[in-house]
Image (cartoon, rainbow, N blue to C red):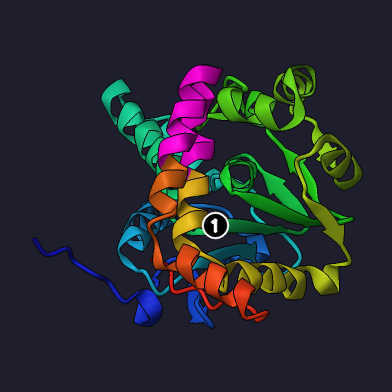
Amino acid sequence: MSFTQLDLSGYKAKHFLWRVEESVGYVTLNIPDRKNPLTFDSYAELRDLFRNLVCDKDIRAIVIDGAGDNFCSGGDVHDIIGPLTRMTMPELLTFTRMTGDLVKAIRGCPQVVISAVDGICAGAGAIIAMVSDMRIGTLRAKTAFLFTRVGLAGCDMGACAILPRLIGQGRAAELMFTGRAMTAEEGERWGFFNQLVAAEQLLPESTRLARTLATGPMFAHSMTKNMLNQEWTMSIEQALEAEAQAQAICMQTEDFRRAFEAFSAKRKPEFVGK
């Protein structure tokens, strides 16, 4: 049996910037004059890219950021919000399911995904940051789940399921009911941001973390990500059994053997990702 392997290092993105350096893929949302909003096309292309990352074993970590001084302002008012008011129910459901598919693709790709958040991080932009595996922010980051501000439910793209797990039920409820922006300091204190850095250090620090992860055991990282996703719906007993199986699988990898040999030789292990 053969499986298709993709090389996305030369992929030419149409609706955002994409590059690969030292096994790290960089997605840059790139409409800075409008604070990097999402469009129907960029939603779909992001979904397809993250789906395809499953088949590229050379890319081992992902950094998502925004051009200029902002991360993402959410769905574009004119390109998305306006047209949505004129759609039929089946068309609306097709769209909302597509946005959910982007969340599934980010959570489902084996690479660790890091969002580098500066300035405005709102609506769907806040969702992309939320569903990333880790988030690094700047002191001027403002994260808003502002769906109620446009007459929609505070929940969107998994927010009611995921955000309370990151920052707690009460804090998530406040942000989703009011639509107010969470400050950077609140985000770090509540556990949304893994760390805050100066604006000029955002991409360098995100790159440093991504490259550190990229040199680690890719198979084990992907297993960790998979278990973090799956164990939400498991009992403790189920989780213990699932983790026992996951570790037994990892113990059969070359990376596990290489780590033991490197430890015995008092040198740093070189992981191959299998």
Which residue shows up at 70% across the image and 52% down it? 135
Residue type at tag 1: Val
Of residue 46 and residue 38, the one placed in the foreground of this image is 46
> Which residues, given as a range, are shown in magenta?
226-245
Q: Determine whether 42 is above or below 216 in the image.
A: above
Q: At x 70% / y 33%, what residue is drawn?
A: 166
* Residue 62, x across and y down, in percent: 54, 64
Q: Residue at x 63, y 48 (%)?
A: 129
Q: Position of residue 169 (x, y in %)?
A: 73, 18
Q: Nearer the viewer, residue 168 or 215?
A: 215
Residue 227 in magenta? yes
- In this rendering, is residue 135 above or below 270? above
- Residue 177 in percent (x, y) is at 72, 18
On screen, residue 99 versus residue 131, left or right, reads: left
Label 1 Cα crowd, 10 Å radius (few <14 / some 14-19 / many 20+): many
Q: Is residue 49 magenta?
A: no
In this rendered view, identify the residue nearer to me: 226 or 86: 226
Q: Residue at x 65, y 23 (%)?
A: 148
Determine if residue 107 is in view: no
Task: State how many labels appear.
Answer: 1
Residue designated by label 1: 112
Q: Is residue 71 visible?
A: yes
